Structures are given as structure tokens and as C-alpha cells.
Amino acid sequence: MTWRRRASKDDRSQKQEPEMPSSALFIPLLSTEKPLYPMDRFRRTIMPRFEPTFSGLLPHAPILIPDVAGRRLADCRETVAACRQFAKRLVASAPQRLFLISPHSPRHRKEFGIWPGPNLTGDLAAFGFAKLQVEVPFDRNAASTLQECFADLGLGLRPIASDRLDHGASVPLWFLAEAGWNGPTTVLSLPESWDVDLEAAGRGLGAAAARLGPVAVVASGDMSHRLAPGAPAGFHPEAQAFDQALETLVIEDQLHRIGDMDPRLRDLAAEDAADSVQMVAAAHEFRCRGREVLSYEHPFGVGYLVAVFWDSKSTGSEVPPAWQQLPAVAREAVHAELQGRRPKSRKEEKGCRDRAAVFVTLRQADGELRGCIGSLAPQQANLWQETRDRALAAAFQDPRFPPVKLSELALLQFEVSVLTAPETVDREELLDPKRYGVVVHGSGGRRGVLLPDLEGVDTVDQQIAIACRKAGLRPGAVEALERFEVIKLSE
């Protein structure tokens, strides 16, 4: 088997509002392209926004099917259980159709491929299990819609000249069929060329899905194939670093950075997950909802990651139960500092891998601001440490206020805002001051930040104007805009 990697993208109101001091760290723009704002500098095809019923990554190793695994099932039992959980959750999200990206489907040089109908049939005959078959109806309506959306972006899409699905499609579909899926299905292949824009293809996929109604999207892919002596692609001591990096991107809500992964690392890992994941995540603009790593194992020298990127059953306000304690963590950090002692530890912090950017806001009993400091990228090892660090900064380092005193601590209210990673937007229509915070960028590296859902900030113009004031910019001098979402936790 020849393993090919895609090129890196590195060559490519009167009330005081919460504020980020100039000393705080910002996440940089992820691209060196010309700014996307104002609109007279750059225009792109306006695509309808897509929110899937469910999306994520499933591995495709035939050995994950219990009948194939046989006695070796014990070595991959956690992955098999996670695949089944993923499939049940996808079916429960009630999609009317399914898109699946398979890295093993036959590839054209520069065009994407689509398996034709009337039915899509696959088996594992190549692995000695011809009786293990899966069959789902071909989605003709989706194919024509996808063709139009790809054409709008200058992307090619042609039928695959084969009559049997590859195992990259058949294995995920086996788990989905076991869970009850038998709806209209579209299976796509990736192009052979490294120069095709997968993010653009993801946008086209999302645009088509947005026109078609409730849709689930699945990336098929296995992680490194070089994790142990005797692995399918041989052993490499650095291969595990790829698996750790991709899993971290999911955990930290950083999937928009997948195109910037080190191409050398991807190549030596002999992986086939990153391209599928990038295209699927781009379909919903790299936004995640209910993201979760269900399992990661690496038996047989191959890494298997099962991950959810989007679950429509997860409400926007739903957070891990332990996160509800973050305001108390912030208060305890300030209290301990005022008393000259170490903050009390919490059992929930042990083993915590959650990392995210955080703002901590302090308010007086009447709601007036008493301090607020945060960052746009995580700086500490986990969310608990991040919260403590920002709480101390908000209480003692906000230049607009004197340091908090012990005598007033009991009267203060602590609020912790956990941020998603900022994403670039190219038009104001994609902003919403109630839902999204905003980052404005101007010349000389000047940046201004405003959190969402602030009292007295009801329009996009108001939001941008305030953020510009923070950055010392005129609204007309904005060169780029970013937005982010917030999970707000209060005492």
C-alpha cells in the first residue's frame, strides 16, 4: 500500500464591559492569506450553514467486527463498544440521510469520487469474510445536489467505477446497520492529489447537506499504522505522536488546525484519518457540539480513535457535571491567595484532560463589573488550572480596578466563561452578539475582544464598535473578524 500525505497549509452602553488587557495572550490567525474583511477585499460563494444531526470519526479495520476478530476481540473490546455506542447515537439523532467519507475508496487524480446506485453494497470478501455484507440505498438526490455545490466551488465529482464498497466504507456501515440505519446514503472518496482544498470540499458538503434536511456525516479513518513491531506499515518510534496530536485537537476543540499538522508526522505515521476528519469537520465550519472522545486504543500496532464532533441531542448549555464547579474553583483560588495559603484541591481535577480558554468575571452584588480577564487560547495544563490563573488575574491584575480585598470577597459573584476556539468569518451576517463573542484585528497586531450576551450590546454594529474601541481601531479599519462561542457558568 502506498501512503500519501496532503501538503501542509503553512505555506499558505456606558457600563464597563469585560475586557482583555493588552498583556493577555491571543490565538493567532491560522492563515497567512489576505484578510477576509471587509467584504470589498474578499468575496466567496455564500453557502447555507449546516448543522448535522451527528458527525464524528469511526475506524474501519475489519478486525473490529466481532465475527472477524474472533478470539482477538478482547484486544479491541473497548473500540468495538465505542463504535456501537457511536452508531446508536447517530441513529438516535434521526438523520434522514447519511454522508460517509472513505479514504480507501478508489481515487481520481484531482476529483472527488462518489459511489453510484441504485444500492450501495459492500462485504469483507477480501479479508476472507464474504458473508459479512452490508447494503444501503444510494441517495440520488444528494448526489445531484452535491454535484452542484462542488461545481460552485470549482471542485470535480465523478462516479466511482466499481460495484463493491471498500472496507473503509463497509466497516463503519456495518456498525451503523447493526444499530438500525438503512436510510439514503452517500459514500465519497478523496482525490489522489495533495493540492485539492479539503476545507472547500467540506464547505460544499455542508452546503449540500443544508439543502437536503437532517443529515449525519461520518469520517472513516484509522490512526497510525506503525505503533508496534509487526504493525501493518512497520514500526516507527514517533508514530504515536500523531495519534496524540489528533486526539488532542478533538479534546481541545481545535479541529480547525488539522490542516496545519506536520506533514512529516502524518507521513511517518502512515495514517488515513486526518483528511476525512478535515473534510467532515469543515462541513460544519469546524464548530463542535457535544464533542467527545469515546475511546482510543492501539492493539495490533494500529491506533483506533472513536470520536463525536457533533451531536444534536447535546444542548448548547450541556456541560460536563464537573465543570459546574469552576466558579467555586475561581472563588477558592482568590480566597486562598488572600489568606496566603494553597487552594484546596478537588478530586475531579485528577486525570482531567479538558483544556480550553477561559474568562473569569467578578461582579458586585448589584451586577456592576469588578474585574474580568481571560485569553483566547488555553495556557495551563487543564481547565481547573486555567480557571485559577484567570481568577487571580481578574481579582488582582485588572488595571481598571483596585485589587480585591478579603472583606469584599463574600459579596462578589464569580462567573467562568469557557470559550471555543475562535474561527475566522468573512461577513457580519455570521455574527450574533447574543450567541458569539467577537475578536477584531487591525494593523500593527491590534486586537479587541468582546464576550457575547452582554447587557446593552444588542446589535452586531454595537459589538464591533466596542471591540474596536478596545483595540484602538476605527470600525472601518478592521482587517479581520473572528467569532467564538461561550459556555457561561455562574454561582
Image (cartoon, rainbow, N blue to C red):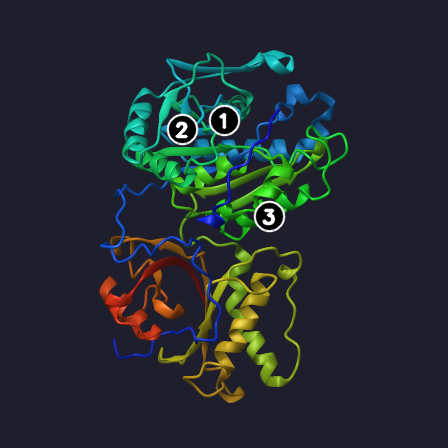
Q: Looking at the picture, how far across and down is residue 355, in whole percent?
A: 55, 58
Q: Is residue 119 visible?
A: yes
Q: Nearer the viewer, mark 3 or mark 2?
A: 3
- Under circle 3, the secondary element is helix
Residue drawn at point x = 40 percent, y = 52 percent: 316
Out of 49 and 331, give the one closest to the viewer.
49
Left or right of residue 192: residue 457: left
Q: Amino acid at mark 3?
A: Ala
Mark 2 closeness class: few <14, some 14–19, many ≥20 residues within 10 Å = many
Left or right of residue 301: residue 401: left
**Displayed quadrant of residue 142:** top left
Looking at the image, tell me whether mark 2 or mark 1 is earlier in sequence order: 2
- Under circle 1, the secondary element is helix
Q: Looking at the picture, how far across and down is residue 218, in whole percent?
A: 46, 33
The correct choice, above or below, for 293 with respect to 110 in the image is below
| Residue at the far front in the pictured view | 11
Residue drawn at point x = 36 percent, y = 62 percent: 437
Give me the C-alpha separation between circle 3 and circle 2: 28 Å
Q: Nearer the viewer, mark 2 or mark 1?
A: 2
Circles 2 and 1, Cβ within 8 Å, touching? The answer is yes
Looking at the image, tell me whether mark 1 or mark 3 is earlier in sequence order: 1
Which label is found at residue 222? none
- Residue to which mark 3 is pinned: 245
Q: Amino acid at mark 1?
A: Leu
- Residue to which mark 1 is pinned: 176
Circles 3 and 2, Cβ within 8 Å, touching? The answer is no
- Residue to which mark 2 is pinned: 98
Residue drawn at point x = 47 percent, y = 31 percent: 193
Count how many numbered circles sit on residues in the image: 3
